[in-house]
Amino acid sequence: MIDYFKSELAGNGILTLTIDQPDSQANVMDRHFIDSLRHHVDAALADPAVKGVLLTSAKSSFVAGADLKALEASLSETPDAAKLYSECRAFSALLRKIETGGKPFACALNGAALGGGFEIALACHYRCAADVKGMMVGLPEVGVGLLPGAGGTQRYLRMLGVARALPLLLQGSQIKPAKALEMGLIDALVPAEALLDCARTWLTGSPDASKPWDRKGFRIPGGQNPLEPAIAQLFLGSNASVQANTCHNLPAPQAILSCLYEGMQLPMDKALDIECKYFVRLNLDPVAGNMIRTLFINKGKADRLMHRPDSIARHKHQTIGVLGAGLMGAGLALVAAQAGIAVVLIDRDQAAADKGKDYARTRLARDVEKGRTTQDKMDAILSRITATSDYALLQDASLVIEAVFEDRAVKAEVFARAEAALSASAILASNTSALPITGLAATLGRPGNFIGLHFFSPVERMPLVEVIKGHETSEHALALALDFVGQLKKTPILVNDSPGFFTSRFFGAFLNEGITMVAEGISPVLIEQAAHLAGYPVGPLAVADEVGLDLAHKGAQQRRQDEGDNYHPGSSVPVIAELVVKHGRHGRKNGMGFYEYGDSGKQLWSGLAAIWPQKTEQPDVEQVKARLLYAQLADAARTMADGVLFDAADGDVGACLGVGFPAYLGGPFSTMDTLGLAQVIARCELLAREVSAERFAIPELLRDMAKNGQRFYGKNALVAPASRKGEAA
């Protein structure tokens, strides 16, 4: 057995077990971890010299969660329900042994404890936490399609009552230590240097080594009969809310509700068995596998900069420049300054640049008012932003990001002025969402130092950055760009240069299909509701208004100008032109788009039916859902075949984090694997015949994959054409 624990027995009978996984920066829950924990728990309970046990960690966090390598390997295997249940019950029983073994266990949380790590802590009789930066506790499993499977649901229920436990579990809340102390999830919050003494003091005070729910007469706080009016109403309301928010697409929230409903009527050990059964059921559902792969494993790889060239030394950016102090540029300046980077924020004149800095000031002042930061921290962040119109101040910048209008001439002008001021090693980046990077680099003296960095709005909240590699982009530029994204703690995906890159093109397929259906006479209400039922956060018509119909119209005109005879407008282009040019409807910004916007909210514009009369017979909602989904799947397959994506993981992470693809599907490539390529091809061929041969065209790559039994993940997985070529498409 590989032992992950260091054991030290003091003269007073207190055994300190320190989790310290060998050759790892963090403790992860793999087979060796569980075997080690079982060995030491059994030994401690059997040794009469041990009077109490202190459990802590030698790492910066308590337990980091599941082992990613083992988890990824398991996704390629056929799930074994009996094995999953056996493993779940064994671990749950181990934690129950801590709880009922008759000796007091204290847990000293020196860093974040989430998921299984916090379930271990909850099984202990006392929990003290260090008041340090980054300390969080909680059970976030619902975020990857699961529920806590080692007693978390039942201990939350018995510690907090159903009214407080339900929202924490349904939202996967990560709780700050002061709040956790207030709720009773931890028992003490102390400075880091006092942490172990806090636990030892409790252990030497002859504590009760039992939990309230194992004592006679225990009642769940707030009531334990689900038929009591208040509790019944809570479950009814929560169930309605879950169904309204998930449209039956996410099984985990429903399983959590059922787990608590059933568990509160049973003694602890039987309730833990119920929890394991629901945990296994969720593990067998492809939703959990897809969410784990994309939102946990693949996102984790992206966060670790998996595409960064190893040959280039790591670079910590000290100063960057931002060209354009509008909403995007101002947001970029703010997040960079918050990451400790000095920012030169440039616009056409001082007043425009100052306005961009004022944006940061306003946002930070709001955070101070809400207690999220302090005045001193706000002042320090603002001091890092220099608002100016003087390009000479860029001389110390290692990176400059352009965030001006989507106009080639304007971009070329600011690039030329910036490049003249920069050192030879500095890199230039464009935040363009669609204009090909290679074309923008054509006017530069050092095109190898040019790259695309497509941030999403609002920059402060959106976690994704699409990194675009042009034909001449160097490894040096790629490395420095990824280092910057890493400093911001955002998630990068890497794509090759192509019109629309991946995210704008993929997102455009969704918008285009929805808008096209309006022109076909399909009810706008049906289109928007179908999108909601399919799991999209916003319908295509509403999101088109948010993006701006006028911007979409200008983008189409720009592409027509750039591509000339090669330009093939999407079927939504004339619809948008009609609304913008003939009716002056620009979207939410001017209160008129597909929707009407007023003080009482928004509603679909009644004038749409006058322009595009609705069919007497409307399609089934499932047909509309299928068109929205398969238009995107077909486009994703084409981006892979076209060499835009280096990896299916980039497409899945980009789709879910950047453009609102339903998270429960795990992204387009996970979805195609789940459905089966044969079904995807057959459905697209049907839609190609009935709707559009162009929009639902399937590339030969997908047909070859189906013929050869390939998938996008797991055994016999496709190696992306772009990765095989090793060069820009």
Image (tube, helix red, strand yellow):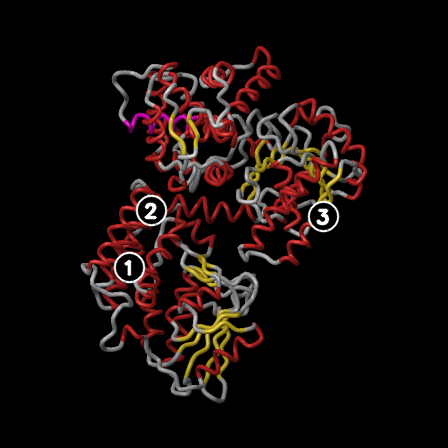
Q: Tell me which label, 3 or 2, sits earlier in the chain.
A: 2
Q: Nearer the viewer, mark 3 or mark 2?
A: 3
Callout 3 secondary element? strand
Residue 204 at what x, y percent from top left? 45, 86
Residue marked by disc 3? 342
Residue at screen point 30% across, 25% down: 623
Residue marked by disc 2? 78
Q: Tell me which label, 2 or 1, sits earlier in the chain.
A: 2
Q: Nearer the viewer, residue 181 or 72?
A: 181
Cα separation, mark 3 vs mark 2, equals: 50 Å
Question: Is residue 729 shown in magenta?
Answer: no
Residue 35 in sight in this render: no
What segment carries the magenta color? Answer: 621-634
Q: Determine whether 93 is above or below 534 in the image.
A: below
Q: Pointer 3: residues within 10 angstroms few (<14), some, or many (20+)? A: many
Q: Nearer the viewer, residue 541 or 416?
A: 541
Callout 2 secondary element? loop
Q: Tell me which label, 1 or 3, sits earlier in the chain.
A: 1
Residue 723 in sight in this render: yes
Q: Pointer 1: residues within 10 angstroms few (<14), some, or many (20+)? A: many
State whether the magenta stretch is mostly helix, strand or loop.
helix
Q: Pointer 2: residues within 10 angstroms few (<14), some, or many (20+)? A: few
- Corner quadrant of residue 618: top left
Pointer 2 with pointer 1, Cβ within 8 A:
no
Task: Name the residue furthest left.
Answer: 227
Residue marked by disc 1? 275
**Amino acid type, residue under disc 2 in the picture:** Thr
**Amino acid type, residue under disc 1 in the picture:** Glu
Query: Looking at the rendered structure, which numbered label has been put on residue 69?
Result: none
